[in-house]
């Protein structure tokens, strides 16, 4: 081992216990996570695993990790076989390693530390919290709670599913990056939380080459042939539909089998939703889970198209045979780039009231900055066309011909002289002063209460190899209105269902991207006076087809809270993970 | 021939519904309709079993041994438990059965064998889901009976109530089926827009079925995710260990562990949160299924001699929405004369547009003012102190009912009084 290694490796279940390389032999993988000296739990600098089971009313005692002379933790479950699945200590290692790996991936994409969505540094993780087929992120509890249940004779542990752990972890990470996305808003925002979590969970597997190889070959009965040292796979098995059917695009295999009684029936396989522009307008897709699947389908189908495009550019070994290793490598590259821009696009999204089209604009903008030359694989064209086939378009008027955010055009009107460059990089007070002084040009409404939510650095390597430093700043504004004031504020007729005496809170928000000189590069905004959006949001939350509670009432807050946190099956978010 | 008068007997069933309607005709003949007979909690000092038998016998006396119509609005215990003949056959359901109703009217979701109906897959899935919900409730009740740790008293009470109300009541359900299949009797399973199911047995009265909508009908107005039948089918197995294992069995019986009462310092805070989160999850699940069951309620509108009588069972907004979206139905409902307050006076069962539309409500006690009938028992359901508007009956609604209508409320009946009798002249007042 190299003296200066900064990672340590752990064995995890690559998918879940239902995925076996041979009968009784689950598919394991070894993953690298940041090096740290673990306390018992394991408890590290960002994750605190506590194996308390409320149903059995007991705490399973943690495994103590020993260290190598190089200070890496020694994996007690290596080499692993099926027996480790019966040890709670392995379950603890599984959640720890999957979470830390994903956290590291987010930090790699963003070039900075990423916080959870609550005050505090360590995320509690409870791998056997209770008997229930559910798992969720709870901001209030600073925790990921995983349930388990019995399927006939077998126990099903949600914490052993890579996809479910990664999905819930993504909720916690997304909450840390965009806390506003947990607020009640329009239909897309809740759906985005779900769809994004699915996408990240699935894309993060492609860098595990042994898993991709298994999914492409043994698991679906596709043979490997050999020419010299080259291992070859039939091109027919690399078509889009064939790949969409693989393990790689299904989420939660064991859970799906247990709950449906069908083998090889993952919980979700969004990619199989055929492109259609009708989904978004149909009532069935107003629900967060269903709507999230449209977003996930657009992302994952983009991944498939990119992978296939990359494979098509590979040479063949005659008779439509492709190098298996090259195919796996191309999948890893495609997923890696998509994962990077998917994460970085969050920085380029508005702080709240997200619609899928905004995220698409952010995605295209980020990609054009990372890779200005799109000619080789036409990533951006593929992504844009695929999203369009699901009815997702970038917002008109805010984007350029390539679908990227318009760059900020009014720098000559901005007063920079009273703010200090160095403070602007990190100090919310300094940024707020800047905002307030420039409220006219930045369309920040004086009547509203505005605050800076975050100021974060974003570092990346530019196309010329130089390090680029940008600063990402989020601000939100809110104002309390009565229905009667609607027309005077929004210059639109008051919706019939909104009574003059009804109090409502409306929000405005924006993300400012400052370039390396501290000048505004993008101002990605949801102005408070955007009448079209405000009507849509209010109607969604309080209109005739919404639940009947009065806006702002205690019952309304409870409903919104429950819809987000409790994930009741008939209201919102997730009852299944 | 049209009836000239209605005698409505609102029985003291505590938290539940039991209404006997007697329509009186000009020749002094009568027709009797029993709408629901169930309870999940009696006022203090009232013995549940004895009270239910007393009521059954009173119904028998009132209708002189013959019911024309029996309505079971939905399968919640607080609406049908009285139809259970009990194992020994000495329950109130045996007395009711002997009243030989000519029509037994229930929502379409109760139709036997519908769960296997391949030609109506959506309906079948919906019915299967309802069965799954009963099973979830049964398991929750078993959980609550084992006194789980870490739940606060209010949550524990609420969970216990919801669990009990949602478990299937096979005795009552089978008795309803048996009554409907008696030779000469007719079982009707109705939905929004069904033909008048009672035309033959209630002369001069038009009975409109305004709910529940069918799966297809409700899909037109529903923006929520369809109640996922798969979820509720698999839900039972998700809730608790199966087979011989007890509720507190561990999947790792041999793993070294600390007992929940002796947790090390570093686990205490999160353990408390996990326990509470577990209770909240149960509440969320059981509230969702309680609502789904309420939304299978029949909503009936009787039009008799120029008066309109509205009996919506426990229908909540999702059930109401389809009917209220039809302008002609909304218009029809404005002139309701007697309103059985939905779902014991809860927040979500009297849609605002319905209440606002009632043209007969009036602060002054004039003749012809709206009559409202409420059967409820406070402090059974929801929590007034939680501030979330879930208490039943809901205080602002109760105040509005009191102010703008002649309110008959079973929970204000003096101790020992068996029913509140409401008399309504059905002829148009000149």
Image (tube, rainbow, N blue to C red):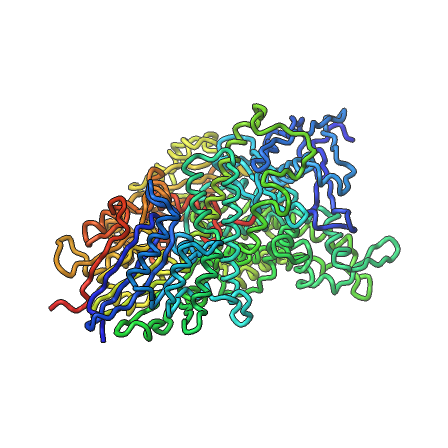
Which residue is at the front of the view, B24 or A30? B24
Which residue is at the front of the view, B254 or A262? B254
Q: Position of residue A142 (x, y in %)?
A: 51, 34
Q: Residue furthest right?
A: A228
Residue at figure coordinates x 76%, y 53% from the top left = A326
Q: Position of residue B305 (x, y in %)?
A: 21, 70
Give the left or right position of residue A278, taking residue A313 as reference.
left
Location of residue A208 with respect to A243 vertically, above or below: above
Location of residue B153 with respect to B164 vertically, above or below: above
Which residue is at the front of the view, A100 or B257? B257
- How many discs mark residues in the rendered view? 0
Give the left or right position of residue B402, taking residue B323 as reference.
left
Residue B229 visible in rendering: yes
Quarter of the figure with the C terminus of chain B: bottom left
Q: Position of residue B33 (x, y in %)?
A: 32, 64
Residue at figure coordinates x 38%, y 47% from the top left = B48
Residue A537 visible in rendering: no
Which residue is at the front of the view, B408 or A263? B408
Q: Position of residue A458 (x, y in %)?
A: 54, 38
Quarter of the figure with the N terminus of chain B: bottom left
């Amino acid at each position: 081992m190299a003296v200066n290694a900064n990672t340590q490796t752990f064995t995890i279940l690559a998918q879940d216990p239902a995925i076996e390389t041979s009968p009784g032999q689950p598919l394991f993988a070894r993953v690298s996570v940041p090096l740290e000296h673990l306390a018992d739990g394991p408890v590290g600098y960002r994750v605190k695993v506590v194996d308390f089971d409320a149903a059995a009313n007991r705490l399973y005692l943690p495994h103590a990790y020993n260290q190598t002379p190089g200070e890496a933790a020694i994996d007690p479950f290596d080499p692993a076989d099926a027996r480790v699945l019966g040890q709670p200590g392995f379950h603890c290692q599984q959640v720890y390693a999957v979470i830390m790996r994903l956290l590291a991936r987010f930090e790699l994409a963003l070039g900075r530390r990423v916080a959870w969505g609550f005050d505090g540094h360590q995320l509690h993780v409870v791998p056997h919290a209770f008997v229930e087929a559910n798992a969720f992120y709870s901001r209030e509890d600073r925790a990921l709670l995983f349930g388990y249940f019995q399927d006939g004779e077998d126990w099903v542990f949600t914490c052993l599913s890579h996809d479910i752990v990664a999905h819930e972890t993504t909720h916690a990470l997304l909450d840390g990056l965009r806390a506003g996305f947990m607020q009640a808003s329009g239909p897309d925002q809740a759906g985005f939380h779900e769809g994004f979590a699915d996408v990240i969970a699935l894309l993060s597997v492609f860098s595990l080459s042994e898993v991709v190889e298994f999914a492409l070959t043994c698991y679906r009965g596709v043979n490997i042939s050999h020419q010299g040292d080259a291992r070859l796979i039939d091109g027919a098995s690399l078509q889009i539909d064939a790949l969409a059917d693989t393990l790689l695009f299904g989420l939660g295999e064991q859970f799906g089998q247990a709950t449906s009684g069908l083998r090889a029936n993952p919980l979700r396989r969004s990619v199989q939703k055929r492109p259609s522009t009708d989904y978004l307008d149909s009532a069935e897709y107003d629900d967060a889970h269903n709507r999230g699947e449209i977003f996930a389908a657009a992302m994952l189908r983009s991944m498939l198209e990119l992978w296939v495009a990359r494979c098509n550019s590979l040479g063949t070994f005659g008779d439509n045979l492709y190098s298996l290793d090259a195919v796996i490598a191309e999948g890893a590259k495609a997923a890696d780039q998509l994962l990077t821009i998917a994460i970085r696009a969050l920085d380029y999204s508005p702080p709240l009231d997200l619609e899928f089209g905004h995220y698409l604009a952010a995605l295209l903008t980020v990609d054009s900055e990372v890779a200005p030359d799109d000619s080789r694989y036409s990533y951006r064209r593929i992504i844009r066309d695929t999203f369009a086939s699901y009815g997702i378009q970038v917002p008109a008027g805010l984007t350029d011909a390539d679908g990227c955010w318009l760059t900020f055009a009014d720098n000559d009107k901005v007063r920079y002289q009273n703010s200090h460059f160095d403070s602007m990089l990190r100090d919310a007070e300094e940024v707020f002063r800047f905002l307030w002084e420039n409220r006219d040009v930045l369309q920040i409404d004086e009547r509203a209460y505005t605050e800076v939510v975050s100021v974060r650095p974003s570092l990346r390597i530019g196309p010329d190899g130089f390090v680029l430093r940008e600063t990402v700043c989020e601000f939100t504004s809110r104002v309390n209105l009565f229905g009667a004031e609607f027309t005077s504020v929004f210059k639109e007729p008051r919706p019939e269902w909104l009574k003059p005496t009804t109090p409502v809170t409306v929000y405005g928000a924006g993300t400012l991207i400052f370039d390396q000189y501290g000048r505004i590069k993008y101002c990605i905004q949801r102005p408070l006076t955007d009448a079209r959006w405000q009507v849509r949001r209010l109607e969604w939350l309080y209109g005739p087809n919404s639940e009947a509670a009065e806006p702002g009432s205690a019952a309304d807050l409870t409903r919104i809270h429950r819809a987000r946190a409790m994930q009741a099956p008939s209201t919102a978010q997730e009852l299944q993970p | 021939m049209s009836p000239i008068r209605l005698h409505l007997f609102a029985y003291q069933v505590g938290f539940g519904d039991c209404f006997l309607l007697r329509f009186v005709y000009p020749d002094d003949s009568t027709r009797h309709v029993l709408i629901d007979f169930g309870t999940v909690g009696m006022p203090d000092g009232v013995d549940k079993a004895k009270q239910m038998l007393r009521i059954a016998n009173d119904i028998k006396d009132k209708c002189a041994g013959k019911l024309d119509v029996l309505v079971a609005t939905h399968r919640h215990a607080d609406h049908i438990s009285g139809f259970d003949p009990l194992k020994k056959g000495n329950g109130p359901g045996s007395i009711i059965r002997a009243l030989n109703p000519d029509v037994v009217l229930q929502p379409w979701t109760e139709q036997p064998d519908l769960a296997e109906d391949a030609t109506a897959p959506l309906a079948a899935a919906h019915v299967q889901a309802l069965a799954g919900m009963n099973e979830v409730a049964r398991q929750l009740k078993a959980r609550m009976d084992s006194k789980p740790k870490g739940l606060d008293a209010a949550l524990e009470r609420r969970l216990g109530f919801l669990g009990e109300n949602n478990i299937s009541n096979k005795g009552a359900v089978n008795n309803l089926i048996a009554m409907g299949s008696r030779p000469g009797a007719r079982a009707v399973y109705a939905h929004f827009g069904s033909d008048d199911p009672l035309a033959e047995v209630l002369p001069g009265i038009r009975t409109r079925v305004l709910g529940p909508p069918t799966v297809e009908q409700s899909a037109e107005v529903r923006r929520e995710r369809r109640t996922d039948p798969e979820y509720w089918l698999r839900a039972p197995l998700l809730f608790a260990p199966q087979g011989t294992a007890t509720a507190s069995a561990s999947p790792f019986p041999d793993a070294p562990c600390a007992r929940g009462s002796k947790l090390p310092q570093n686990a205490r805070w999160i353990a408390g949160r996990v326990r509470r989160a577990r209770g909240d999850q149960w509440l969320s699940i059981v509230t969702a299924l309680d609502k789904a069951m309420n939304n299978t309620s029949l909503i009936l509108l009787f039009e008799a001699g120029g008066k309109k009588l509205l009996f919506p069972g426990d229908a909540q907004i999702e059930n109401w929405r389809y009917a209220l979206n039809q302008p002609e139905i909304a218009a029809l409902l404005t002139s309701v004369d007697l309103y059985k307050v939905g779902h014991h006076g809860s927040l979500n069962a009297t849609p605002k547009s319905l209440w606002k539309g009632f043209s007969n409500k009036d602060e002054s006690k004039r003749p012809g003012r709206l009559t409202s009938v409420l059967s409820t028992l406070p402090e059974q359901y929801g929590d007034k102190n939680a501030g979330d508007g879930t208490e039943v009956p809901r205080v602002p609604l109760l105040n509005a009912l009191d102010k703008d209508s002649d309110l008959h409320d079973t929970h204000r009946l003096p101790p020992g009084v068996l029913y509140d009798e409401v008399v309504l002249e059905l002829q148009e007042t000149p």
